[in-house]
Image: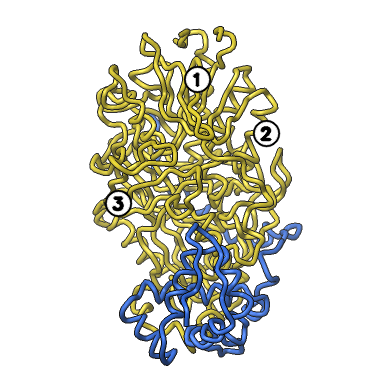
Chain colours: A yellow, B blue
Amino acid sequence: MSSKDVPDVLIVGAGASGGVAAKHLAEQGFSVVVLEQGDWVNQSDLPGLRPEYELLGGGPWHPNPNVRQRPEDYPLNLDDSSAVIGMFNGVGGSTVLYASCWCRAKPSDFRVRTLDGVADDWPVSYEELEPYYRQVEYDLGVSGQAGNPAYPPGYAPPLPSLPINMAGRVMAEGMNKLGWHWWPGYNSIASQDHLHQKKCERYGVCMYGCPQGAKGSVDVALFPDALARGARIETGARVARITLDENGLANGAVYFQDGEEKFQAAKLVMVGANGIGTPRLLLMSESARFPTGLANSSGLVGKRFMTHPFGTSVGLYENDLEDWVGPTGEAIESMQFYETDASRGFVRGSKWHIIPSAGRPLGMINRFTLGEGGVAEEPFWGPAFTDRMKSSVGHLIEWMIMPEDLPEEHNRITLDPSMTDSDGLPAAKVAYTTGDNTKRLVDWNLQRSLEAHEAAGASKAWITSRNNPSWHNMGTAKMGDDPETSVVDRWGRSHDVPNLYVIDGSVFPTATGVNPTATICALAKRAATHIVETRREQEVSTA
Amino acid sequence: MSAVEVRLEPFGGVVLSAAQRERLALLADVVVAGGAGMPSASGAEVHTQWIDRVIAVRADLAEAVSRVLVLEGDPDEVLAGVRAGDPELFSGFAFAVAGAYLINPRVRRELGYPGPAPMKSPALPGEAEAYLEDGILDVVIARGPIYRPTPGI
């Protein structure tokens, strides 16, 4: 193969970050190949419009690959993890099934060491990232309300806000009684026709895939543009290792497709395989030059795994709130308790948001049978069941409490010594325990959320869950300026391999207290922009 | 009574005999007895039509149904015993029954859902603004910024 036949960029993973990078680079004239272990998702296959959608969401469309067990899923050993893990393997990645909550991190998230004396500052600031947030918000059809005092001035989503619906309105009145912050939710769901996205029709099944194509899942919103500019996606292509030339530059990847081992050459490699898949791949790419894993001279690949083990509370309300009306993302959010207040007994904070509860009627079972405050001990089955359902479906508001989760090196991803995927590659082993700060943070905020329910007029409110699987897999290839204490630099480029980039949530130095997709996409856009701007200085493999 | 035939591959199907369906009706009514203007599990045809939709897509729930159906005795006592001795099995069985119950269109209608499955509910023109037009956000804005600024650090 001559050098002109070798694509400029190979991207591993067709998820959020891969979609952002592929679109940007292809539009800038780069030749791009994407290797994705899953397949395209046909909109007509999505379960959301079938009566048994909730059952399908607990089985073949489950976010946990160990439950889903599709051929393209690699297993996870969760024996040492208090967190259950979510991800989706396919074109679009986890954005296919995500709720589309779109949350910029806040300025303080990038300076937690300076402000709060914990973890690490990021090598980028909110102000540096802001232009990239703005660009990806346009590309992904983000709807929301300008003027939120929880952010610096100028945050104005490209599309008008979606309705906050009755549940949002009722809770907003309660929050006003308490003098607490709230704001109409931000969602990467189009409130009007926008580029490739159709206007949201509020089916309320966002987490089962959008049947309308309104959601900013990157298979719908971004990859069509990348493909139109010549990018190529190889599906069913599970990458086994990234390869290096004799000079230590990345020169491609070995992958399995239909059981056959193949090689894809490239001048530059980007990895966007999520906070578990990325360290797994780097660790599988060990070599004589990198015996503990590719790009792992710091020893941090796989370490500092963070997730958002969120909690939930519900309140019962007399009025029918028709709380099955979508979207599922955020009706309203609150940043009242986001910033550190040392008097609370923990550092950092939490974003709260309301999502429709009645879109998941089977979810009522756990809300009652696992409910705290004595609810679990109350009758639920038998004669009580229909009364419980009648009084709660459409009459219940649910707060989700998204906590900052601080990095700890013992929370880590390693290669499982015995478990393998269908190609014989090692499974990822997750070791994770929820930190004390996170537990205190969630507990304190859940208690405040009960006060919010009371102020909003709930006849009864209780905590329904803690330690929920967030699908937010972060921190396992830390970004930083110092090669001894980080895996990649401020652009996402490996300190060890100058033409290898990591572009997913692995690079997060801290978890922030918000859903990560916005920041993942903004960082990927920034990395891709940097690659274009420095193309003449970029070292590339010619072997 | 023979065990339900369970295919081992994920999300495979099962076939219930007439006798098994009769038994399921009795057991399912212990889980969903009906009331508040709503039918029992058997009144909602859980044991005839809707359980098939559940076990067709959830092999894990099919197995729970299978394991409970082979237990003989008074339905109340059987399920009380399962609940005390094997809560996970009880949860699986109850979840299967509830899942079958809640996909019955009649049940969904009784609960207030607008249709037998999720449906379009497009926003009316001006609906988003209508929720906010009485100035409900004004007090939030009036309190001013609540973020910690970080310029220069």
What amino acid is at disc 1? His
Q: CA distance from mark 3 to mark 2?
A: 37 Å
Mark 1 and mark 2 in contact (Cβ < 8 Å)? no
Are there few (<14), some (14-19), or many (20+) residues within 10 Å of tag 2?
Answer: some
**In this image, B91 relative to A333: left or right?**
left
Identify whether A75 is placed above or below A507. below
In the displayed image of the protein, which residue is found farthest to the front? B2
Dot 3 or dot 2: first in sequence order is 3
Image side of residue B4 versus residue A343, left or right: right
Which of the labelled discs sits on residue A224, or is there none?
2
- Figure quadrant of the C terminus of chain B: top left
Give the residue number, with chain letter if any, for mark 1. A530
In the depicted structure, whether residue A205 falls above or below residue B97: above
Q: Is residue A157 visible?
A: yes
| Residue name at image x 52 percent, y 77 percent | B97
**Quadrant of the rendered image containing residue A407:** top left
- Chain where mark 2 sits: A
Residue where numbered disc 3 is placed = A81
